[in-house]
Amino acid sequence: MDTVSRVKSSRRRILGTLVGIAASATLAGCAQNAPQDTWEPKGPNAEMIHDLDNLVFPIAYVVGIIVLGLALYIFWKFKDRGQEIPVQGHGKPYMEITLTVVPALILSVVGVFTFRTIFDLAETQDTEIVINVTGQQWWWEYDYPVQPEHGINQPIVTSGQLVFPAGTKVLLRETSRDVIHSYWIPALNGKKDAVPGRVHLLRLEANEPGLYAGQCAEFCGLSHANMRMEAIALSKEDFAKWVANQQKAYVPPAAGTVEAEGEAVYIAQCARCHQVNGLKDAQGKPIISAPDEYVYSGAAPNLTALMTRNTFAGAMFDLVNEKCRADVWGAPSEKFGEAYLKGVTEDCLNQKDLRAWLRNAPEMKPMYAEPNLLGPSDGKYRGMPYLALTEDDIDKLVAYLLTLK
Amino acid sequence: MFTTGSKYFIGLTALSVVATVLYLFLVNPSDLGALALVGLITSAATLSGVSIFTRDSDTETVEQAVDASAGPASASFWPIVVALGAAMVLLGLATEPVVFVLGIAVLVGGGVEWMVQGWSDRASANAAYNSEVRAKVLGGIEYPGLSAVLTIIVAFLFSRIFLAVSKDAATIFFMLVAAVIFALGFVFAARTDLRKKALSVVLPVSIALLAIAGVVSALSGERKQLVDAAREDHFAIEHRECGEEASKYYDKHANNRVPLRKAVIATITVENNEVSAKMIGLDRKVDTITIPRMNSTTVLFRNLDDSERRLVVNLGSAKVGDTDVVEPLGTCTQLTGKGQEQVLTLTIPKPATAEEPFSFTVPGANGEIKLVVP
Amino acid sequence: MAETATHSADHAADHGHSSTGISNNKLAMWLFLGSECLLFGGLISTYMLYRGRVSDGPHPEQIFDIPFTSVSSFVLLMSSLSMVLAVTSAQRKDYSRTNLWLLVTAILGATFVGGQIYEFTAFYREGLGFSTSLFSSSFYTLTGFHGVHVTVGVIMLLSTVGILKKNRATGDKAESVEIVGLYWHFVDVVWIIIFTLVYLIPA
Amino acid sequence: MSTATESHEDTHEHGMSDAGYIKIALILAAITALEVSTYYVDFGPLFLPSLIAMMFVKFFMVVSYFMHLKFDNKLFSLMFYIGLGLAIFVYVAALATFKFFM
Amino acid sequence: MAIIERPDTATVPAVVTPSQAFGVIKRPVASSGWREWLFTVDHKKIGIMYGAVALFFFIVGGVEALLIRLQLAAPDGRILSADQYNQMFTMHGTTMVFLFGMPMAAAFANYFLPLQIGARDVAFPRLNALSLWLLVVGGLILNASWFLGGAADGGWFMYAPNSGPVFSPSNGVDYWVLGLQVAGLASLIGSINLIVTVLNMRAPGMTLMKMPIFTWMILVVQFLLVFSLPVITVALVLLMFQRSYGATFFDVSQGADPLLWQHLFWIFGHPEVYVLILPAFGIISEVLPTFSRKPLFGYPFVVFSGAAIGLVGFGVWAHHMFASGLGPVSVAVFSIATMAIAIPTGVKVFNWLLTMWGGKIWYTTAMKFAIGLVTLFTIGGLSGVTHSVAPSDTQQTDTYYIVAHFHYVLFGGMVFGLFSGFYYWWPKVFGKMLNEKLGSWNFWLMVIGMNMTFGPMHILGLQGQPRRMYVWTEARAGEGFFNLGFWNLIASIGSFILAAGVLFFLINIVHTAKKGKVAPADPWDARTLEWITTNPPKPHNFDRIPVVHHLDEFFHRKYAEDTATHTMKRYATAEEVIKAEEDAADAHIHLPSPSYWPLVLALGIGVLCMGVVYGVPVMVVGAAILVFSVFGWVLEPSTADDSEIDPPSVDGSTKEIAPIG
């Protein structure tokens, strides 16, 4: 952190003016607060990359302006104004050599810095917390291996939002269950592909608590455009609270309530694929979901503590309504943890999208759920199918889901 | 309207359509048969198309030419071939579809040859010219066709012989045959006077010998080891024995190199009789490996001890079919020697139960690596 | 293959006069062979990479029959000798010896193909199907591609015999034989590599 | 290679005598025998390098003598060896990224 | 073409001769009408057909692009479904690369390469025809998928395992695999043909270093093709075996590594980029000197930098994979190698600028497109340098910034170069001048449209919009007037301006065909050999094979340096130069005769490929046609025997050239 910021600040000073002039023309035309802006680094890894940008882009700008200026001058100066046909000279070798050596020198400077940054960004020995990230068409699963130093005593499985402590060196171990995806939170680091059968590593660190948006960056099939992610950096204390909440025991709804009826619907319809840790059937046997029997890629989001997340369906939809969403996204970093940990309350819930999703998920998100397309995948679905739930069931389910926090 | 040639091909097309229809209705259609006939229709139709569209000469002139040059046709053995084909087709209708298909092939081959010969015989009064016309039309098919047939027959018959005799006999036989061919080549190259005569004797005799040997071998079937191997399927995944001892088939000639070391999640090493594990990217030993559920994952196993070891993954147990017999689940690598590597690719659909946690073990070595599937 | 070049103005000259003084056909063949190096390189690399990935069925070393494959490699290697003898005969315009050696080469090639059919059948019996494992898919693809090349070569050799016998060659006969020979030798050198990398090294 | 002055005669009368080719073939046969012997005799640490070396010797013998590259126009060699060299370079580099050679 | 060798047939009485009975599979000798085109082996006709095919696919790919931009003009677009959008961008990329870029370069190469080196045809005229027909067959197979259950939907890079049968259940990928194999075969054959042509068939005196630069660049491109196409063939074969025959190459549950596909694809794919751009470089390296009235500055440097780009181009493929987890060492090596390739590319730009320096620049439409290339390519090249910095690239790759980069390179580079070539060589090919006024509209609309479309994509990408998304959402578009929505809209509007520019070109073609000005012999005061013949050239190209003494031979036949004033003085007109050649015409010209076999062979390969989808019987038919035509071909002499000319020429074998009008 310290070395990085020192290098950063010294280089900033030298390049500050250049960048200011050169980039201002472009930046003037840019959106403010674009959540995926690659030039707004919010963590040391992204800053390292941005420092390189600050070197390369000005060079490119300057070279570009010189070359294009020269070109314009030539276009104007040597226009046919009736001058004589020039003598047929074939060039000057010394000039050629100069024009070869100069770019080579410039590029070797760039090369040295590039070289160093590549290896800095590949460093993993300073890792403080490991999180496994698994891509699947079209959502991300996060699982936190047991790490007692962070209060994680049993594996936590979640999806949609990656929650991690700010100011901590996180190592993501990425993989995929089906096709290649790419994990990309522009404000925190460059992208790294999640390749099935391989584990790829990505350093992540946020300077401050906050919400950092990203998107799957490797084309991964039908709903690639709908595969988004949000990375939630919490202060260490808030993170500990979040961890504790994720591990707390399941409390079944009181018998006779709508929520209890909802639990029955859930067990009948959803528990085949979606795991809720601690959920037990009528005989008191734990229910283990078997998504591998229904979904080609073999997993479905774990819904334990669903209402602590702000999104669902691969972060395609918000689980909170617009007002509550704005509260979280707009919270200053010192207030952010508080706003986020509130979770989804009944009046904050995005009823419209959630209900529509339960009613007919394939209509909301293209995902090869049509039964006639399931031949090559042995009849297994590629996403959540149409379940033919009644409105009554949906009411009950929503009531039940609201208890999962 | 149509040139002479195109008429033949149109006729052939019609004939083959009829044959196809008959075949599809009368015989139990097999892929092979449909293949042959559809192929025939299409090629005949293509050829008719080509000959109609590419017609350059004036029709009348051609007709006149044909009239003018009508002469005695040369002797031909193609009718016999066609008759043979027809007989085979009839026989095939009654017996085996393969015979039917072969019959069709003979019929077509003979028929085309016959027609082209008949046509070229009347092309002009000049016999040399006529044979050139014939060659022009059929050269494109004859050379490669005959060559391919010859190649396939020779290769197929040899393979039957190799399959029928024992491994060693096959090797020795192969060596001898090659040596003989080569020796004959040198003899004939050196003794030009011998060549013509001897070649006309040696070639048919050896082909006949090969044919007899090949057919006999084909009929006698493959050697016992192969039949047994096919029946018992020694190397199938369900026959793996994952104990400390070497198993008869699975551990025979272990595979000890892993060329693709990049696509692995962790390396499990056994050294000084102790099992240890490292995750990719983290240079420290771990006692737990976490693999996401239903995620195809490969683990690299490296043996640094003198004794042969194997990596075993224990994935709980399950009932076998409908019986009450409970068998442990899991799989293992081959036994591997010092300094060698093996990989194990796993896809685990469900988390472990509390009673039967998953683990990696190395029989005969201490320690286990816990395997967590969240 | 036996495409004849467009001659430029000097059609009086029998040999195609070219800027470099070399034959168009041969140059094209060599380019094609240079290109084939990358084709077989890709297939060999795929095999090398996947050879150790056997999640089901036999491993390479468990089923390879080295003595037999050694003989078939040897046969293919020696067919290169008969091929080169055919080429020198053709250059001496000794077409009867050319035909003899072409025939020997073709028969040796056909026995090699026979050996390969045998090998594939035996492997299949022992449990190595095309879809069994990464090893099986890449092995069959690599050796199958080579086998197809050999088969095409044998057909070319036999057809050349037929064309030479019937005197139907359209170009320079010696050159046609030489070009078929180049192809044949290339198929042989590919097998030299496959034999070492695929068969001998794992054993 | 850029001029048309290449002499015409030696494009056809190149190569060696039949006996020369037979000698080459015998050498190739001997090397093959040596290769196969690695299957029966333990070569120890020399196993891999010796096999690779023998493979290359055989390869280049066939290419330079049987395929005449040694005697023929250098342009042919250029065409073929560019292909061969590129093949070795790109595939070795690609395999290296899979930790093939470690 | 044998037409010119034939006496007038009308006057010859119909005599019944043996030759006429060949009727059935008689080889075409003198043909007319559509047959003249279908069976031709003339490199000029083939070149024109290549151009027509490529132009057709340019329009197809362009329409696909417009649909993509329509969909993305506003958030949550509903013009296309997700599935349709994925097919659209896959086919847009595939079409533009394989069915427009490569064939259009092949069109120029086919037409002008023999002319520029002073040859009468390519080395293997029938193989040349085969390449064309294979390309057509490949294009048809690729695009047939639209009507047979949906096109390929995995992106033009078709990464495994997303291209597997489960993830792409329609037959689209199968057609894609087959179409590309056929088109690849076409390019492979074409490239071998052209290399042999360049090396072996140059006019007397034309050493390699006196070859026109366009020919040089084409030569480099053909070498790239010869050595890169087999690699994609391997990849396609693996994928085909996986999809159609159950192979396991990319099956991760068996332990496969999907990165194998990426390596194979990009080992081909990167040289492919140079295959697309170098012909355009070659074209403008002809156009810039012509309209600056100066030789190319540093000709040897341009040649060697082209060759260097080609060679180094084989060592940088993994820069397409910086985000795919190669490991830091590989990334660093390929990052540096990629920077190195910027150097020869920069040399080219400087040489073009210095060619114009001190010149006498004549702004024709061809010249405008050429300097358009120089400027736009410079921008694309510089954004390329930012990609070579691997860490930065991990932020840029798979975003619209990359889309912007390669469209500046490929549209601003390749397409502008090709358009420059259209305007420069149209009079040579068709004997009529393209309208300069319409040309001006064409150029300016394309420049404006291109910058409006692809310029904003730099911003879109740097602000985090990934590519290949069928919709984008307002929620991630940022705030302010200039948010991503604004720039998406601008890009979409720009694409239609661009399309209007192309439309003007099409209008120009029709206008020129109808009432275009007949071209003078030397409309541009040009410099290279292709102009030492009539417009359009005679079937045999040159009455006499020109003898070459200089680089820019034609120019030096017209001009000489006045040693007193150190200026160039004209001492011969183009007409005089051409006349001098005509007067010394060769007496005997044998040209190869037309042939059916290339067409039949291509058809056979097409049928064979469909067999992969439709089963073995179809394959057998295709193989039969294939084998039949191969041997028919081999047994057919390239120049028709006199007996095949029907009726035979009066005096046997001597064929005089018909007088040239």
Image (cartoon, rainbow, N blue to C red):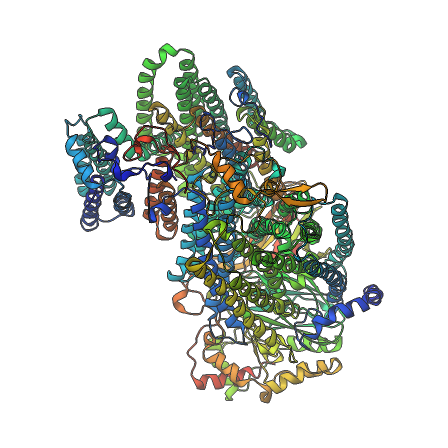
Tell me how many marks there are.
Answer: 0
Quick one: E482 or B108, which is closer to the camera? E482
Image coordinates of residue C39 in percent, x first then y, are: 52, 41
- Position of A107 compared to E136: left or right? right
Report if residue E505 is visible in the image. yes
Report if residue B322 is visible in the image. no
Q: Name above or below for residue E457 compared with residue C28.
A: below
Q: Name above or below for residue A131 compared with residue A208.
A: above
Q: Name above or below for residue B174 compared with residue E138.
A: above
Q: Name above or below for residue A244 compared with residue E559.
A: below
Quick one: B360 or A72, which is closer to the camera? A72
Image coordinates of residue A310 in percent, x first then y, are: 61, 79
Figure quadrant of the N terminus of chain E: top left
Q: Residue at x 51, y 66 (%)?
A: E499
Which of the 4 quarters of the picture holds residue A20?
A: bottom right
Image coordinates of residue A190 in percent, x first then y, are: 68, 64
Quick one: A298 or E651, which is closer to the camera? E651
Figure quadrant of the C terminus of chain E: top left
Which of the 4 quarters of the picture holds residue A220?
A: bottom right
Image coordinates of residue B178 in percent, x first then y, are: 43, 22
